[in-house]
Amino acid sequence: MIPFNHLGFVFKYFGSVIYPKKVLEELCIFLEPLSNKASVLDVGAGTGMMSELAYRCNSELRYVAVDPANGMLKYAEDYVEIHIATAEVLPFDDDSFDAILMGESLHHFDDPDVAMKEVVRVLKKNGKLFIYDFDKGTFMGKSLWAMEKLLGEPAHFYEVHVLKKMLEGNGFTVEVSNHSWRYTVSATL
């Protein structure tokens, strides 16, 4: 297993370089329709990088982050409310959030199907989901999948069409953008 509790510093200060400018642009477009004071949940947040990027788009939103690794969450910015939790057991009431973000986290979830049901549960009607992750259908995606498997990670990497089908099966309308060996998904419940 990757020792995420001890890697917060590395992810905080070097992780942001792997987010292409185009992803930030798509994230801003995704957040644009939300009213100020809307609630955004960052699932598998790590150091809160997706919340930090989203904050650059709209600082008026309420940002909440969950991750099982306290050693990662302690690097989240002060404007992010943090909770130590897994994606499979989100500690929130039904219909709590207007939007949910997952930045390079879905492939780390122990049970993505259960996590997606939790996302649907805590997301408000017409809520939005933004996912940024690695495409297993590419050479780099397959390489990362193999490396994470060797390190004992769950490594639930998806090819885009498989993830799209999973999301649609959970009631989402899905739009996908490809970014070389990564993708973004913008989905509405």
Image (cartoon, rainbow, N blue to C red):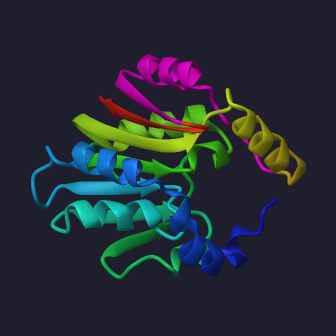
Tally the marks: 0
Asked whether residue 43 is in view, the answer is yes
Q: Nearer the viewer, residue 121 or 129?
A: 129
Q: Position of residue 116 (x, y in %)?
A: 49, 35
Q: As displayed, is residue 1 above or below residue 163?
A: below
> Which residue corresponds to the image point at 27% horizontal and 49% vertical from the top-left?
97
Q: Is residue 58 left or right of residue 154?
A: left
Relative vertical location of residue 67 with respect to residue 140 in this rendering, above or below: below
Above or below for 168 versus 53: above
Rendered location of residue 34, percent (x, y): 15, 48
List the single residue furthest toward the left. 35
Pinpoint residue 132: horizontal percent, then vertical percent.
48, 44
- First to last magenta residue range: 153-179
Q: In the orientation shown, which residue stands out farthest toward the right?
A: 150
From the viewer's perspective, is 104 left or right of 95? right
Residue 171 on the magenta span:
yes
Left or right, 74 with reference to 139: left
Seen at 68% across and 44% down, the residue is 110
Residue drawn where x is 51% and y is 80% of the image: 75
Give x and y (percent) for residue 11: 60, 71
Q: Quadrant of residue 111?
A: top right
Q: Quadrant of residue 113?
A: top right
The residue closer to the viewer here, 158 or 69, is 158
The C terminus - image quarter? top left
Q: From where the camera sits, is residue 172 visible?
A: no
Which quadrant is the N terminus positioned in?
bottom right
Compare residues 120 and 78 and report the one nearer the observer.
78
Q: Is residue 144 magenta?
A: no
